[in-house]
Structure formats: structure tokens, C-alpha cells
Amino acid sequence: MANNAVELLTLSRFEANNSQGIPRYVNELYKEVKTRMPIEKRIIKYNKILRDLASFELGTFLQQNKGCQIIHNPVGFFIARGLHDPHSYITTMHDLNPFFKNISEKVFHIMFERSIEYNIKRSKFIIANSTQTKQELLERGYPSKQMTVINLGLDNRFLLDREKSIVGKFMVGYVGSFAENKNVGALIDAFSNFNDSNAVLELWGKPAHKFKELRKKSCRDKRISFKGIAPESRIVEIYDTFDVLVYPSLYEGFGLSILEAQARGLPVIIYKKSRIPKEVRKFCIEVEDQVHLTSVLLDIKENGYNNVIQKKAMAYARAFTWNRTAVETIKVYEKLLE
């Protein structure tokens, strides 16, 4: 086994099918790197056991990563255990400021912070998924010379011409999770004040803490529906049914759904106060509050999406590809293999 090989620690394919950016990043990076790296320089294992924090750490401990000069941990808040030195350890950092409110989440927050600190200290090199994440790492004291920004990307399905589905309704959509930082309750409140019987709000994503409260909040408005996790096989089709995507999140390490929607030609609305990386929010429509959001929805319904801005946003979003992500990541590998 070549002693200059790279191993990319991976997650289960099942975990990629939940409309979230990190699992999609891990899976797409795996596929692209496996295709593009010379065989003698890669040991790419895809262990379907590695699905969550506990199994990831147990799995990496049992794998006994021998023969690899580089170990790449693509999930910054999981710890790779039992690694044999010498290794050049690389970590991709995604999200450094999760929202934790209740007691059990605060306990997890402590574990989360310790994992991040462990990975920062052990890493010879860090890949930040956005300029915002890089700045947060710099604020933690990590030297910039040992760090680079490599953005997430889109697969080829998002680059095809859009065939708008005709559903006879003004379709407002959301794709993501229902964690508290996603601020979906604010979207539900704003839409409830949008007095248009021909408008509907479809919410796609994985249930999370206080999901029942969101369902209860929306139950009086029959125009609002929770659709479940967006199937990976239908994700582009789902975007293509929307007239607008609203992404009310308060904080994102990246915000892949925004670029996916823009690549499909959709206007995307976010809150001006939200912490979303500048490279992702560039062509978003920023609103001040729920009243402003409601008025913007009305304007889009009545006047459509500005064609000039739409074309610019589509071209910009479609420049973010997994091909580019993989090429830039392999450059990091090659640099450390020199």
C-alpha cells in the first residue's frame, strides 16, 4: 500500500438523502476525488457504518488507518480516533456556531466545541467551506497560512435548463432542516399574513427539536404543508415547482439550498440580519422583517422575477460545482504530499 496515499473519511450514503449540505458535500467529494486522484495516491474507503458521531469515531478507531500520509476528516465536529502517526490530518470546517437551547443540547454543545478544538489543534491544514467560516476560525486563533476556503458545489442536475412545473398556484418553498437556527417559525408567521388564497407554502426537510411546535403553529393555515425530507432523486424537480425560495435561517456555515435554488432560476429571500456567507448571499433578496417579507412575496407574485438579475444569479450559482470543489481539494492533497 502506497505510503503517500490519501484517505477520505466518509459517511453513509443514506445520510446524503436529507436535504442538508454537509452529507451532500461528503458524498459528492468522495465520488469526485475517487474519480480524479491517481490510483497510487488514494485509499478511499466508503464505510456505510459511519452515520453519526458515535459510529464515526468508533469506525475510525477500528479502521486503523495505516499506509496513508493524509487523513481527511470532512466533518469538522466529528473526531477521527486511533490514527497512526505520522499523518497529515486535514479537517473541513463547516459550522462553528450551532444553536443549542435545552439542557441536552447544551451538553452536546460542550462535546461539539471540544471536537472542534481537537480537530483544529490536530490539523496540519484546514479547509473552510466559506469565507465566513474562515473568519470564525481566525477569530479562534488559527493561523491563516494553514487554511484555505473551498466552497461547496452543485451537481450537473442543477445546471440543466429549467422546465417549470405548472401547478396553478403561487408556490413558496423552503428546503432545509427545522433546527432552531433555520428560523422556519418566522417564515410560517410571515406567510400566514400573506393574504392570497392562491398561494401555498411547501416546507421540505428533516424534523428537529420543536418540530411539533412548528406543525402546531401552521395547522390553522391549510395553505401550509410539511412535505418531509426532500428525496435526493427529486430534489431538482421540487425546486422547479417553486416560484420563490424563502430561506429564513439566522446562521449558516454555507447555505447550499440558496445556490441550488438560484441555479434553477428562483429568486431567494433571506433576512438581512442573518449570518450567511457573502459568497452565498450575493444575489439574494434581503428583507428586514416579516412585514417586509410578506410585501416582497406579493411583489414577486404580481411582477415576477427581474430577468436580468435572474440570469446573473443563475450564472453565478452554476459556477459552484463539485468538480471545482474536488479539484481545489486535490490541490491541497498534492501540496501536502510533496
Image: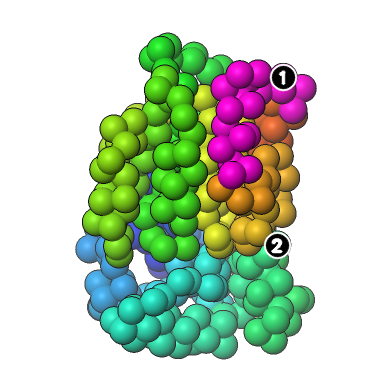
Examine the rendering and report whether any part of residue 321 can be seen. no
Residue position for label 1:
307
Dividing the image into 4 quarters, which one contains the C terminus?
Answer: bottom right
At a point 72% along the width and 45% down the height, the residue shown is: 282
Determine the image quadrant of residue 135: bottom right
Residue position for label 2:
131
Q: How many marks?
A: 2
Q: Which residues are magenta?
A: 291-309
On whether residue 153 falls in the magenta region, the answer is: no
Q: Are marks 2 and 1 in contact (CB under 8 Å)?
A: no
Examine the rendering and report whether any part of residue 65 can be seen. yes
Q: Nearer the viewer, mark 2 or mark 1?
A: 1
Instruction: State the residue in front, 214 or 51.
Output: 214
Determine the image quadrant of residue 264: top right
Instruction: State the residue in front, 202 or 185.
Output: 185
Amino acid type of the residue tagged 2 in the rendering: Thr
235 over 184 or under it: above or below: above
Secondary structure under tag 2 reads helix
Magenta span main SS: helix
Amino acid type of the residue tagged 1 in the rendering: Asn
At a point 65% along the width and 18% down the height, the residue shown is: 303
Give percent across and percent down for residue 257: 51, 43
Instruction: State the residue in front, 316 or 323.
Output: 316
In space, the residues marked 2 and 1 are separated at their CA atoms by 29 Å
- Give residue 328's mark: none
* First along the sequence among labels 2 and 1: 2
